[in-house]
């Protein structure tokens, strides 16, 4: 895609709206996460003559969009202690982790590099400290 702006891509707009949801209960974010799941589900991608389209789309997502999705997780877990532990932040991180779990289940090859390159496992464990300290269990 020549001359495109990352911030004008539909996937990135959906992710930004999900992250910026002002509802304390994140009602809009939950709905937008559902839209992202549908868009990212390989089972929903139509089979075509060109079998590489699914792979091309996922490569594109992991190159241009996933960093926006994981930005709140990276920002909140920059150190060994979470930066924000308020209800909304914890709920948003939970939604992001739920979507990342979906990606692990459905895009094993693509998400592996993201997990390794962005140190996501350590950062997820920092988030897990929030849940364990409050008596919650990650699903």
Image: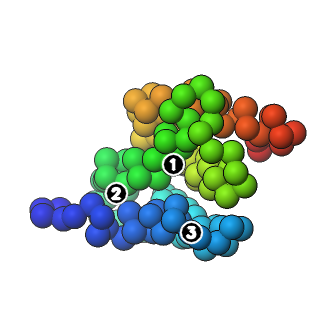
Q: Is residue 8 above or below residue 71?
A: below
Residue for point 30% across, 64% down: 7
Horizontal and vertical percent for residue 64?
31, 52
Q: Which mark is residue 57?
A: 2
Residue for point 58% across, 52% down: 96
Nearer-the-camera pick, 37 or 97:
97
Instruction: Residue under label 1, please give it.
Output: 72
Q: Secondary structure at mark 1?
A: helix
What is the C-alpha distance between the residues marked 3 and 2? 26 Å
Q: Is residue 65 visible?
A: yes
What is the C-alpha distance between the residues marked 1 and 2? 23 Å
Nearer-the-camera pick, 75 or 109:
75
Are the two marked residues, 1 and 2, in contact with CB atoms closer than 8 angstroms?
Answer: no
Q: Quadrant of the C terminus?
A: top right
Horizontal and vertical percent for residue 74?
49, 40
Of the numbered discs 1 and 2, the one sitting upstream in the chain is 2
Where is residue 21, by image quadrant? bottom right
């Amino acid at each position: 895609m020549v001359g495109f702006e990352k911030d004008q891509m539909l996937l990135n707009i959906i992710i930004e709206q999900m992250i910026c949801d002002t509802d304390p209960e994140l009602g809009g974010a939950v709905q937008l996460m559902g839209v992202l799941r549908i868009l990212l589900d390989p089972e929903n991608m139509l089979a075509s003559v060109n079998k590489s389209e699914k792979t091309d789309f996922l490569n594109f997502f992991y190159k241009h969009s996933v960093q926006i999705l994981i930005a709140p997780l990276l920002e909140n877990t920059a150190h060994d202690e979470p930066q924000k532990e308020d209800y909304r932040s914890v709920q948003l991180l939970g939604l992001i982790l739920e979507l990342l779990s979906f990606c692990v289940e459905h895009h094993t090859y693509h998400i592996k590099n993201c997990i390794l390159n962005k140190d996501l496992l350590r950062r997820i464990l920092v988030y897990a400290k929030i849940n364990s300290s409050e008596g919650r269990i990650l699903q």
